[in-house]
Image (tube, rainbow, N blue to C red):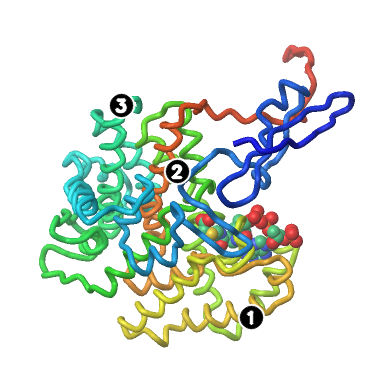
Amino acid sequence: MTDTNAHLGLGEKKVDLPVRKGTIGPDVIDIGALYKNTGAFTYDPGFTSTASCESKITFIDGDEGVLLHRGYPIEQLAEHGDFLETCYLLLYGELPTAAQKKDFDYRVTHHTMVHEQMSRFFTGFRRDAHPMAVMVGTVGALSAFYHDSTDITDPHQRMVASLRMIAKMPTIAAMAYKYHIGQPFVYPQNDLDYASNFLRMCFAVPCEEYKVNPVLARAMDRIFILHADHEQNASTSTVRLAGSSGANPFACIAAGIACLWGPAHGGANEAALNMLMEIGTPDRIPEFIARAKDKNDPFRLMGFGHRVYKNYDPRAKIMQKTTHEVLAELGHTDDPLLQVAMELEKIALTDPYFIEKKLYPNIDFYSGITLKAMGFPTTMFTVLFALARTVGWIAQWAEMIEDPQQRIGRPRQLYTGAPKRDYVPLSKR
Ligand code: CMC
């Protein structure tokens, strides 16, 4: 809905730009006609003032520390719901009825097995490959295994591809882990819930009975809910951009996984835990705080700061509670990493540098300690993030494909290279 206009003057040229209002959140200035009317582009590296799309899925108020999925606060979803319910909500826009939930859970559960040939595909990787490298390759390869769900113009195929990815991601992630540690793959077991099934595929071995710990399964499920979607972050924007060309959904999700891997994004949970281990004891915290504040030192406090949250990340609060629950269940309450984390958080939250720059703990600050206590190696942390974020990527991808206004994403640039010049033959250079 267009409510009012913004007015821009560029030399002699004047242009009226429509201002659009969202349900909540800042207005946006629609600059679509800017180039046509003025011959100028906008310039916003890092997209700090640019909305790249219209979306009805997730809303963040970074100043207030609010995260809503389809209007529902993350705290309520994490407290009362389960991950597959959140998946349904993200995909279809409403919480499911009991019958819809039963049907959705059944459909996801019965897509968890992967093509048997996939297990041979895994063996092409080195055992010491980073599991995220394996994820990028194997998820991309799904398009070679499931040809019957790559036609993006067919709504049924899109739906099947979405269910397949939500269902198979835990199986693939567990296979990446098992391959990494040299243990046999464990097949999914359909009478288990999503999180329990994943824990079993990761930690069961054929020679022993494996019983899922319900506290750990609930924590795993909650970690999945907390990571399910986060509007137009780098990996989601990557998925949308890849999908805008008409690429198949498996390839688009593989592109999202590649982007997520970086330490400024999903790789931060691994980096945060490595940092806590490097700090080791609370007495070394001041040294690391000083390094984080030193302009000449590239070191950053991993798990702190966020492009959008200029307040406590609401996911971090829930994550902190989950960390305590898991450590209590496992009898690790005196975990030295937790002591370092709690002390570091306390110091950073009272330090003028961090206060002034509004640097608060983000979700990655506590997730690493929890995952480590549950038995995951640091190399698996970002894999778990990718597993959970898959639903967000798919929901955002589907929203884009179903948008009748959708066009290929094609940013422009400010060119500062050499002007036109003539080729100089090699003998004259
Ligand atoms: N430690 C110390 N200083 C920091 C930190 C930090 N973690 N984060 C930002 N700053 C400083 C930065 O040096 C800059 O200072 P100045 O204005 O004096 O140059 C200022 O704060 C603004 O930083 P920025 O890099 O311009 O902010 P950004 O919005 O581009 O970056 C960020 C956001 C998340 C990449 C960054 O805060 C960071 O690198 N944090 C550590 C990595 C991390 O925890 N990432 C996980 C993000 S949450 C999960 C996810 O999205 O995947």
Q: Crowding near pointer 2: few (<14 within 10 Å), some, many (20+)?
A: many
Left or right, residue 279 beside residue 39: left
Q: What element carries label 2?
A: helix
Say which quarter of the image contains residue 193. Answer: bottom left
Confirm or deny contact between disc 2 and disc 3 (CB under 8 A): no
Q: Which of marks 2 and 1 is nearer the N terminus?
A: 2
> Given the image, on which type of amino acid does mark 3 rest?
Asp
The answer as to whether callout 3 falls within 8 Å of ligand 1 is no
Residue 154: mark: 3
Residue furthest to the front: 3
Distance from the alpha carbon under mark 2 to that under mark 1: 34 Å
Report whether the residue tagged 2 is closer than 8 Å to ligand 1. Answer: no
Q: What residue is pinned by disc 1?
A: 347
Report the amino acid beneath label 2.
Gly
Numbered disc in front, either 2 or 3:
3
**Residue 399, position as x, y percentages in the image:** 43, 38
Q: Where 184 falls versus 137 (above or below)? A: below
Spatial separation of the CA atoms under disc 2 and disc 3: 22 Å
Can you tell which of label 1 and label 3 is closer to the viewer? Answer: 3
What residue is drawn where x is 10% and y is 66%? 207
Q: In which quarter of the image is the C terminus?
A: top right
**Pointer 1 local density, CA inside 10 Å: few below 14, some 14–19, many at least 20:** some
Picture disc at residue 256: 2
- Disc 1 to disc 3, how far (Cα)? 54 Å
- Which corner quadrant of the figure contains ligand 1? bottom right
- Residue 237's x, y, as percent? 52, 41
